Amino acid sequence: MVTVILLVRAQADVLPDDRADLFYSKYSGGGMDITGESVLVRKKVTEDFALEGSYFIDNVSGASIDVLSQASQIKDERKQKTLTAQFVHDKTTYSATYIDSVERDYKSNTTSFSLTQDMFGDLTTLNLGFARTRDAVGENNGTALVPVISWLGHADSRSYTLGLSQILTKNWITGATLEVITDDGYLANPYRSIRYLDPGSPKGYSLASQVYPDTRTSTSIEGRAKYYLPYRAAITGTYRYFTDTWGIVGNTYELDYTHPLGNIWIFEGRVRYYKQNHATFYSDLFPYADSQNFMARDQDLAASENTTIGAKVTYAFLPDGWKFFKRGTATLDVSRIAFHYLDFTDIKDFGVPDYQPGEEPLYHFNAMVYQLYLSVFF
Amino acid sequence: MQRSTANFLRRCALLCVAISATAFAADSSGPAPEFTLTALSGQQGALSQYKGQVVMVNFWATWCGPCQQEMPLLDQMYKKYKPAGFTLIGVNVDKEAPAVKELLARKPVSFPVLLDPANAVSKAYHVDEMPSSVIIDRKGEIRYVHRGYKPGDENEYQDRIRQLIRE
Amino acid sequence: MIDLLLSGCGGIQPWVKPYERDRLADPIMAWDRDAISSAYLDHIRETREGARGATGGAGGGCGCN
């Protein structure tokens, strides 16, 4: 039901500091409550070689709007393990990562490789990456307490990334990334259904299974720039353009502002706006059963927009180190995301006789995301 | 007309290859540029003070990780070879002195540290990597330039210094 | 190879010298200070938006070594 978190970080020349992080997260919105805990440890084995491992547990409870309008509550747990190996030689960093994610009705593993090369007096950095993901998609036909899983199919995904970073001046750094992803196999969310107009049915519509294409290719280009403000602060602007073979075009705009206070505090604020149109085979209400070859009513494929406002505070409780610790920080990050759907209706709360099928109000909800983490560098 | 253009291009290509081949060797020889800089204490320090000794000029900054890593090792090396006629000058390239003062208060070194906030000396020495160490012989000639620092490099420094001390 | 060509021919030298990178080396100028947090936020977006990919950057920093 869910995809995998990919930790892709790249730096050439010198390996980053050793570190250990303890991470707590909470997502609350749209009827869902998801809490997560994670541990990450990174250690240089030799000056040129480092290993990083992390373990992440997500606890999902509640039910998203589709499940609310159709069936039972969800209660599930997802466990993800990640292992990365990094090797530095001269101006090149090589990375290999393996990610394994398991939940009752979804299994996923990803293998990825990347190469980062510093060039031209370390002003230019080139990054190349390749990742391969294999998923097993299942459906729980039982209940949260007594699950009955049927495995529906597999999905295979390949991603190719090309990134370039360029230092323009002492104060400016810019970057661009291009990523092409191709998927094939079972690409639908089994818990979501389409609906079609059915005058004979009590609600005025009937539900049916989604029918998805078994391939998808997407291209994403992101451009970013970061500027050092003279009084010691940083401002970042990011724009991403997304397009795929399902007809979705998505635009993302983000602005970040980072303001430190001495060596102890860092304050950060962010604003992000995202808008997309719907996939060609998406519809909130199909005119009759089997009206198209491909049909979807998954809210991820609907025309929508969302706005995020976030703030983050980092406090260095060990600014200059202690014994073998170089630095220790504690961070609290709070975001509020307002989701608005432009052609996906709220059929959980609204229906006949007040609203005829297709006339229900559009769905919208707010989500709060909290993150608290402790990081120590050694 | 066409032939001279072709010749010109061929000569340019050869020249380019020659230039690129020598670019890395350019700074590894020749007389060491003279300089006079101020230390944190306010005292002046000049390279010419140390003529007759083997000198290692180490360019470093408070914001450079590998620079921090090699400092204690440079300090050890300085104490070890000083009696034999060796000196180490730390040239700091930070734009502002307070961070340097604070770092040296926490992690002091015994070799002289001079400040180059205008980066004139860094430019004169064609510093193209941080950290950089330039080893100068007793006659004031640059003999070796080491770019960057990785643990184990201090052995190379010591080999070169011993070699020059024996001369 | 590229940097050999650029510095050898045409005379374009890296215009930001290594000793001028103090601001770029400042942690606030890192593309991604907290990778675990960005990965988490990216994941939240990817599971709710149609778009995916191309997030994250490399490069910058002190350029040491």
Image: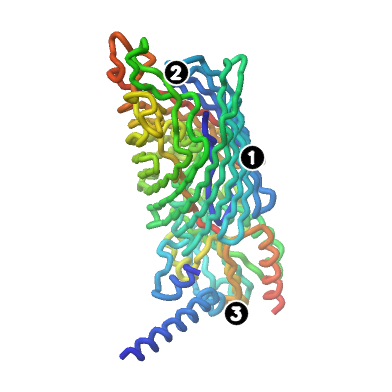
**For the residue marked with disc 3, what is the amino acid?**
Lys
Camera-nearest label, 1 or 2 = 2
Tell me, yes or no, if residue B30 can be seen here.
yes
Assess disc 1: are there few (<14), some (14-19) or many (≥20) residues with their C-alpha within 10 Å of its C-alpha.
Answer: some
Residue marked by disc 1: A53
Q: Position of residue A105 (x, y in %)?
A: 58, 26
The vertical placement of C58 against A338, above or below, is: below
Assess disc 2: are there few (<14), some (14-19) or many (≥20) residues with their C-alpha within 10 Å of its C-alpha.
Answer: some
Choose between A176 and A278: the one closer to the eye: A278
Camera-nearest label, 3 or 1 = 1
**For the residue marked with disc 2, what is the amino acid?**
Gly
Do the residues at pointers 3 and 1 share their chain?
Answer: no
Disc on the earlier residue, 1 or 2:
2
The vertical placement of C41 against A167, above or below, is: above
Q: Position of residue B81 (x, y in %)?
A: 70, 66
Judged from the image, the secondary structure of the residue bearing numbered disc 1 is strand
The vertical placement of A336 against A169, above or below, is: above
Residue marked by disc 2: A31
Judged from the image, the secondary structure of the residue bearing numbered disc 3 is loop
Q: CA distance from mark 2 to mark 3?
A: 79 Å
Q: Is residue B49 left or right of residue A247?
A: right
Q: Quadrant of the C terminus of chain A?
A: top right
Q: Position of residue A146 (x, y in %)?
A: 62, 15
Judged from the image, the secondary structure of the residue bearing numbered disc 2 is loop
Which residue sits at x=51%, y=54%? A128
Camera-nearest label, 2 or 3 = 2
